[in-house]
Image (tube, rainbow, N blue to C red):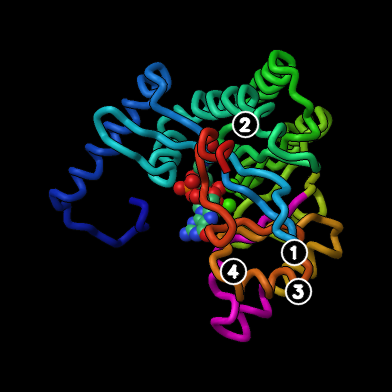
Amino acid sequence: KDAGRSTHTVFVPDMMEDNKRRLLIANSISGAIKHNEFSVHYQAKVAPDESVVGYEALIRWKSESLGMVSPAEFIPIAEQSGKILSITKWVIKKVCQELDQILAMHTGKMVVSLNLSAHDIKNASLVDYIRAMFDKYRVDTSHIEFEVTESAYLENFDVANEFLKQIRDMGCSIALDDFGAGYSSLGYLTQIHLNTLKIDKQFVDNLNVSKRSTLVTKTIIEMAKQLNLQICAEGVETREQAEFLILNGCHQLQGYLFAKPMNLQDLLKR
Ligand code: C2E
Ligand code: CA
Ligand code: CA
Ligand code: CA
C-alpha cells in the first residue's frame, strides 16, 4: 500500500523474513530494557579549534538473541509499535545518571544532547518524567539539549511547540536535527523555539561534489546565522569538509573525523 495505487508487488519470501524480523525486534524491546541490553554511546561535538563542546547520546542495543541491532533499524520499529516512549525514558534516565562523569572530564561549557522521536513529543506526560529525572539526579539543565527532527512538527505543530517550549522553560536547549533531509519547511524556522540547527550529513557529504550542492550548504549556513542559530554540521569525515564548514561559519562539527560514538568507559579513558 505504501507504494500507492495501481501498483502491485510480488510477495517474496524475503519480505516474510523482513516482517518476521521486525516483529521479533518489536517484541524484544521490553525485555531488552528489563535485561539491561541497551547502553548509551557518546559522540563528541567540537568547536572550530577542535575543543569538545558537547556530546550526542546515541543508544546501542546488544541483544542476547539478535546480536547488535542498529538504532537506525530498531528506532523506527519502536516508533511504529508504540515502544519508543519507554526507550526514550530509558535513555533520559541513563544520561542523567552518567552526566556528572561526563561533565567532570571538561572545564568549559559542555552540553549533552538527547534525541527525541516525533512520537515522544505528542506525550505531554514525558515532560513530567523529564522534570522528575532532572530533580532526582540534580541535573543542571543548562547542560542538556534535545534534538528533534522536523517531522515532530508535521502532525501537530501546536502540540510539538508547546512540548518544546516547556523543555526550554526548564533551561534546556533545542536543536533541529537532520535539517534539510526531510520535508523542510522554512516557515517553521521563524516560529519555533530553537537554539541550534544541525545540518544533515547529506549536505556535508555533497560538499565539493558539485558547485550547486556546495552553494546550497553555504546558503543554509548563512540563513541559520541570520536567524541567530548555532550551527552544527553532522557526519564530518574529511579535513576538506571541516575546513569548508569552519570557513563558512559553522559553530560545531561532529563526525568520524573527530570522534566516533564511544561508551562511557572508553570516553573516560581518552
Ligand atoms: P542521528 O540522530 O542523525 O545520529 C547521527 C548518526 O550518524 C549516528 O548513527 C552516528 O553514529 C552517525 N555518525 C556520526 N558521525 C558520522 C560520520 O562521520 N559518518 C557516518 N557515516 N556516520 C556518522 P547511529 O548511532 O547509528 O544512530 C542512527 C539514528 O538512530 C540517529 O540518527 C537517530 O535518528 C536514531 N537514534 C540513535 N539513538 C537514539 C535515541 O537515543 N533516541 C532516538 N529517538 N533516536 C536515536
Ligand atoms: Ca541526532
Ligand atoms: Ca542527525
Ligand atoms: Ca541523520
- Identified by mark 3, the residue type is Leu
Mark closer to the chain start, 3 or 4: 4
Query: Within 10 Å of the Cα at label 1, are there few (<14), some (14-19), or many (20+) other Cα atoms?
Result: many
Residue occupying the point 57% across, 46% down: 43
Point out which mark residue 250 bears: 1
How far, Cα to Cα, is label 3 from label 4? 16 Å
- Is 94 inside the magenta-drawn segment? no
- Identified by mark 2, the residue type is Lys
Q: Are marks 2 and 1 in contact (CB under 8 Å)?
A: no
- Report the residue marked by disc 4: 203
How far, Cα to Cα, is label 3 from label 2? 39 Å
Where is residue 136 shown, x and y percent of the image?
A: 70, 13
> Range of the magenta residues?
196-217
- Identified by mark 4, the residue type is Phe
How far, Cα to Cα, is label 1 from label 4? 13 Å
Residue occupying the point 68% across, 75% down: 244
Image quarter for residue 128? Answer: top right
- Report the residue marked by disc 2: 122
In the structure shown, which secondary structural element does the residue marked by tag 2 occupy?
helix
Tell me the mark number nearer the camera, choosing from 3 and 4.
3
Residue 184 seen: no
Mark closer to the chain start, 2 or 1: 2
Point out which mark residue 247 bears: 3
Query: Within 10 Å of the Cα at label 3, are there few (<14), some (14-19), or many (20+) other Cα atoms?
Result: few
Tell me the mark number nearer the camera, choosing from 1 and 4.
1
Mark closer to the chain start, 1 or 4: 4
In the structure shown, which secondary structural element does the residue marked by tag 3 occupy?
helix
Instruction: Left or right? Give the position of 240 relative to 18.
Output: right
Query: Within 10 Å of the Cα at label 2, are there few (<14), some (14-19), or many (20+) other Cα atoms?
Result: some
In the structure shown, which secondary structural element does the residue marked by tag 4 occupy?
helix
